[in-house]
Amino acid sequence: MAKKSLKNKTFSSKIGLIAATVGSAVGLGNIWRFPAETQENGGAAFLILYIACVFILGIPVMLSEFSIGRAGGSDAVGCLKNLGARRGWWSVGGLAVLASYLILCFYMVVAGWTLEYLWQSVTGELYDGIGSDMKAVFATRMKEYITTTWEPLWATFLMIAINIAVLLGGVQKGIERLSNILMPLLFVLLAIFCVQSLTLPKAAEGVRYFLHPDWSAVTSRTVLNALGQAFFSLSLGMGILVTYASYFPRETRLTKTAMTVSILDLLVAVMMGIIIFPAVMSFGLQNEGIEGATLVFVTLPEVFMQMPGTRIWSILFFLLLGVAALTSTISIAEVSVAFIRDRFGMSRVKAVLVVMLPLLVFSSVCSLSQGALSHVTIFGNNIFSFLDTLATNMMLPLVSLGMCLWIGWFAPKGLLSGQLSNHGTLHTWLIRPVRFIIRYIAPVLILIVFICAFL
């Protein structure tokens, strides 16, 4: 087995390790994608399928990435190299690094939007001059904001600057310390909103809709959507889990860690369902549809407008959203920072600047593609949408497929079992089923999801 890179510090505590890893998984996908998928795919029927996908497929794939990361002790490329993978397999790690960086380019823009909406909530500007047709006004304001030139750019630059400041602190003083603060804050904010949502007039009706399975709405596409949501929400295929696992202490129990991270990630999704559906039902918005950015930047401000203490709830929500965005962008950026450090022997300071400063240009282009550069299209999509489709629908499934094939069939003998058992010091019955899933089931299902994304 390869020795752990001396350049890689480890997380200093179990709590910090869990907080950082959960922070890497919990993001905007839990907050806006999960409620939308649930509404469109049979309520609790989708929830049940999603939970099944997390435990049957998501956790085994997560364990494969954890095993590669901790055993390899380097970046996503270096781990495979250190473990004796042939040159062709290194491209899997390289693809993970590239995919994560492309995601970072447009994710910074969306994260910047959360900062702008948080600021407008604090000042009250977000709710000034709202008439009776609240949805139309909020939708118009959102479109005007994201298509303007400078306002989204300043917010994006601020988010990039915050990321730089945290990443310069390193693994323990930067990523871990921030995660120890922000992740408890995120769950506290979620709990506050759950309590508030359950006191709304039609809360019971909303919870009933969320927790009642409509199996008649389930199709093969529903299953694929649940599988895609599981992979997306657990940050599989991005190189994040491989990179973070390289910071795990040797005594870390990978199976227990994967279970804890997955359960907490599921908890965030369920809490968002408890928050969203009672609110939507109580204010008669159930027929308007719950859709991505519209939910966060249009529908929920409309809900807050009808609640006592509008500004307070708005501030708390966009603070929650900002926390999720920040923990996600930091973890995504760390994939590239680790790669630059380990492949080119740079100091952390230089690596962080090499990774982050070009985003001032790349993320600006993504932001401007919503407005001034909207005429520039690639295969019919603006630059923002093209990068989103390329990275999330194409590259991430290919990375997950490659990781599963390598560790299932080509990795050194005993790598997976050695990592899951901490080289024989732990006894777990999961080794055989995890190996079976990684070898036979995961590759087939990932390939099906990949193909169906283009049908």
Image: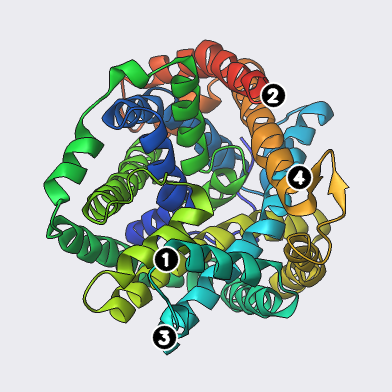
Between tags 3 and 4, which lies in front? Answer: 3
- Residue holding disc 2: 454
Circle 2 crowding by C-alpha within 10 Å: few under 14, some 14–19, many from 20: few
How many angstroms separate mark 3 from mark 4 (CA)?
34 Å
Res. 340 image quadrant: bottom right
Secondary structure beneath disc 1?
A: loop
Amino acid type, residue under disc 3 in the picture: Gly
Q: Residue at x 42, y 66 (%)?
A: 133
Q: Residue at x 46, y 77 (%)?
A: 118
Q: Which residue is mark 3?
A: 124
Q: CA distance from mark 1 to mark 4?
A: 33 Å
Instruction: Residue 308: give its label.
Output: none
Residue at the disc numbered 4: 386
Q: Are dots 2 and 4 in contact, CB under 8 Å? A: no
Extreme-bottom residue of the structure: 123
User: 101 or 317, which lies in front?
Assistant: 317
Label 3's element? loop
